[in-house]
Every structure is written in C-alpha cells, then in structure tokens.
Image: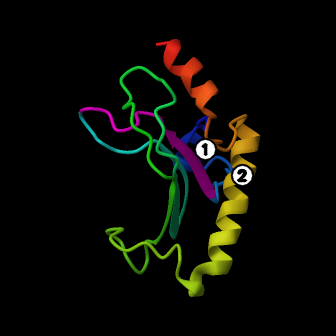
Amino acid sequence: MQGVSLLPRITGLSDAQVRDAFYYRYYEHDDHMHHVWAHYGLVTERYKLIYYYADGLGLANAGDVTYPPEWELFDTDEDPHELHSVYFDPRYRQVREQLKERLLELQHALGDVPYERPTPAQRAKLIGKR
C-alpha cells in the first residue's frame, strides 16, 4: 500500500485520516533464508487476517514446492504473540467475514487480485520464464 505522509499527524497541522486497516503481500515463498509461505493479509488495530496461498509463482528466489492454501486469523488483544489462530472459531465468524471483505476492497483499490492457483499448463509457463 502506498504510504501517506506522517507530517500532518506529527505536527498537529491537520486532522489527517488514520487508516482502519492496511494490506500487505509477501512474495518470497519458502525462500532459503526465511521459509515463510507466500501470503497476503490485512492488519487492523486488533486483528490480523492472513491468507497463505503458498505458491512461489515461478519467481526468482522462491521455493518450487506448492502447498495447500491456509487461512489464519489472530485477535492481537487476546493473543498478542499470535500463537493461536481463531480463524475457525465460531465466535469470530462475523469478524472473519468482515475482514475478508475489507481485504478484497483493499486489494481492488491497490490493483492487486486474489490468488488463483494456476493450472498445470499455466504453472509450466511460469516456471519456463525463470
């Protein structure tokens, strides 16, 4: 997401708008240093929603192994160290759906698209471009 100057907030010169959430994407799938699956997510003041699409997409320095996708949701007020995902907890169903909707809104606003697993033919083309 493109940044916005903090100067108005720091200096108190205006009522700068504070974002309710931010979107991020991590492309370095299962690289040799971090071993984190490729994912994107949404972070709010209280929650973190993460979608691990777990596919290097043929990018340089990304792992070649694709894993089944996974979701995680953390309530950072209740679990500040993010040790226990509440994604499947029925108490968080409404929060989960609202965050997924906001995630899609921010992806669209930024020109990003939700991940769709490539077909074998598409994957062969991706790997052939390396």
- Residue 18 falls in which quadrant of the image? bottom right
Specify the segment rendered in magenta. 21-32
Residue at 35% x, 72% y: name it. 80
Q: Nearer the viewer, mark 1 or mark 2?
A: 2
| Image side of residue 34 versus residue 118, left or right | left
Q: Residues within 10 Å of mark 1 (few under 14, many from 20)?
A: few
Residue at 24% x, 34% y: name it. 33
Q: Which mark is residue 104?
A: 2
Q: Position of residue 128 (x, y in %)?
A: 51, 13
**Farthest residue, direction left:** 33
Q: Is residue 48 visible?
A: yes
The amino acid at mark 2 is: Leu
Q: Residues within 10 Å of mark 2 (few under 14, many from 20)?
A: some
The amino acid at mark 1 is: Pro
Label 1 to label 2, Cα distance in Å?
29 Å
Q: Nearer the viewer, residue 81 or 29?
A: 29
Say above or below: 18 vs 97.
above
Callout 1: SS: helix
| Quadrant (top left, top right, bottom left, bottom right) of the N terminus | top right
Q: Mark 1 sits on what residue?
A: 8
Q: Nearer the viewer, residue 57 or 6?
A: 57
Q: Earlier in the sequence, mark 1 or mark 2?
A: 1
Say above or below: 26 vs 47.
above
